[in-house]
Image (cartoon, grey):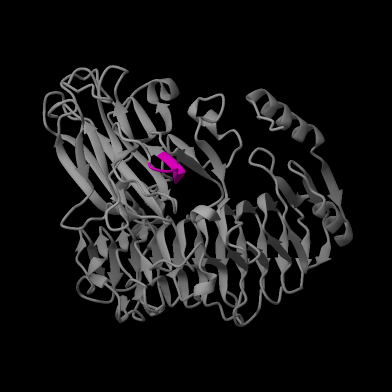
Amino acid sequence: MIMKRTPFLAAIYLLLVQAFAVETSVDTRQALTQTLTKAQPGDTIRIAPGTYPGGLRFESLHGTAQDPIVITAVDPENPPTFEGGNSAFQFSQCAHLVLRHVRIRRATANGLNIDDGGRPDTRTHHITLEDLAILETGPKGNRDGIKLSGLDHFTVRRCTIHGWGGSAIDLVGCHHGVIEQCTFEGKEGFTQSNAVQMKGGSSDLQVLRNTFRDVGHRSINIGGHTGRPYFRPQVDDYEATRIEVAGNTFHGSMSPIVWATAKGGHVHHNTILYPEKWVLRILQENAEEGFAPSQGGQFENNVIVCDARVVIPVNIGGGTAPSTFTFQNNYWRTQHRRLPDLPTEDRRGQHEQADGDVDLDALLAAQQARGRGAAAYTLPSAPLFKCDFESPQWYQDWDLDAPPRNTDTVEDDTDRGFTARDGKALRIRVQEGGHYGTSLQYRFAKQLGEEPEAIMFQYDLRFGRDWKPERGGKLPGIAGTYDKAGWGGRPADGTNGWSARGLFEGMQDGRTPIGYYCYHADMKGKYGSHWRWETEGEDRGQLANERWYRITQYAKMNTPGKNDGILQGWVDGQLAFDRQDIRMRDTDQLKIETIWLNVYYGGSWQAASDYHLYIDNVLISREHPEASPHFR
């Protein structure tokens, strides 16, 4: 018998979890091990003050989104200390786990190690590290304060790392994480190669509002050199991509910022004080075949104060693409008479020649007023909506009482070539002989009480191994049909509705072309216009099977009656479509009504066999993608 979990049963389940959650205090290493090994969702383990031997290892600790497993101190003002051992703690294949108010000291390998157990198909995810002190790790060689491998959806917050051998935090194949409000400080006698290193296919990471002081060779290493077996989830053409570094203050370091076999990366609103040799470096450290040159970094709104040690601010290595980097509105104070030579022009950049001592407080305050430096950084507005399909009740986010037909959430589907991007994804099936995949809607008036004039919609898309459409159909997009017009052969006339769903066409040379399927006031005939995503001769909208893509759409309504509406599209952060002459409406009564997560095969034609695709990490935001920290 198959039992369907209804909302009522789900609520009963949550109540039972909460009812049986246990809070336990422990004061010995043995008691901690026994308690944590048996921990269930919602349990809290509090550790008494004292010094405990390190070398603890735990596997498969699984909390839930609503009820994580929490490890913390009995007294946060007097936290327990774990001393020695290869690693004080190692957590493998865990989920929804919180570790806070713990001190780790003198581990000989890594202070704290969190990994996927060498099995990238079963990710470790939703981990929170808060208010930790990790001291004197190493002291030499590849000995990291925190080692993260194959970790998704995580936060490292308000931690102090003092003295290490390799990296303060080393991230290999990690995704969707934030490191914020931490303090990194080097210590004499420790080799300290990097403070934060992100490599091995790492993506979608933020390093925000931290302080770095004398942390060795590199404060931030965007990329690196990783052996192919250690990439997560798979080898692509970069070591790191979609990285944001903002609001940080750097004191010293041979080079505070380094790009190394990286694609993109946004470094903005940081304060960089007295680097030892370079301000930033652009390198190609993984020169193996198949890796793209370091490219596309953005360096903006930073304050840089140098002394005579910095002769060449930017070090450029061979095999890179420095001309693709952009510099804008940075303040430079150097020993030079003019703005330093950079790979490209610093638009609106400002330079002052150092002529003696400087009042740093006054200088930084003046630059803050101009929107530069760490003090000028403000946290981005939260997105309007996010859905990562991790919760068993994910469908309630879409105002549904049960999962829609043809959908389920999966972490593993190897028969169809599926590899999780991070955690669970929504699997959608178009059945043989049918058309329908799914139709979910986020309605702005119901959720927000208003309808916007402009919106960003982003999601991750992967076509399964069995995705072989002979003809085209619809994909998720943006709409304002108002149940009147703008879909299904109901033409838009400027007053009755509009839509800009995604489209796909039949496979061509093993790839699926995508684009917009747009009902607009200037359309011809009954059905919408087909606009493939291609720009400047580059067909970026041609997607292969068995690979994740990040799809970003942006729509801005036109002035009623004018051809100035905007539709844009990006694939993996690269602009693939840009039209700014669209007439969606002739009346201001039409706005953006809904995000329409629609998958449909046809027209009238039917699927020749079962087709599967996967969607993850849906995000909706008011900001334009290129101004949004959520666009990565």
At a point 83% along the width and 58% down the height, the residue shown is 33
Residue 340 spot, x, y in % from top left:
23, 73
In the image shown, does 402 or 581 lie closer to the viewer?
402
At a point 76% along the width and 73% down the height, the residue shown is 85
The secondary structure that most of the magenta stretch takes on is strand
Is 543 left or right of 562, judged from the image as shown? Answer: right
Does residue 178 show up?
A: no
At a point 65% along the width and 80% down the height, the residue shown is 139
In the image shown, does 404 or 337 lie closer to the viewer?
404
Give the image quarter of residue 222.
bottom left
* In the rendered image, the vertical position of residue 600 relative to residue 256, given as above or below: above
Please tell me whether residue 609 belongs to the stretch shown in magenta.
yes
Quadrant into which the N terminus falls: top right
Is 533 left or right of 195, judged from the image as shown? Answer: left
Please tell me whether residue 277 belongs to the stretch shown in magenta.
no
**In the image, which residues are magenta?**
608-619
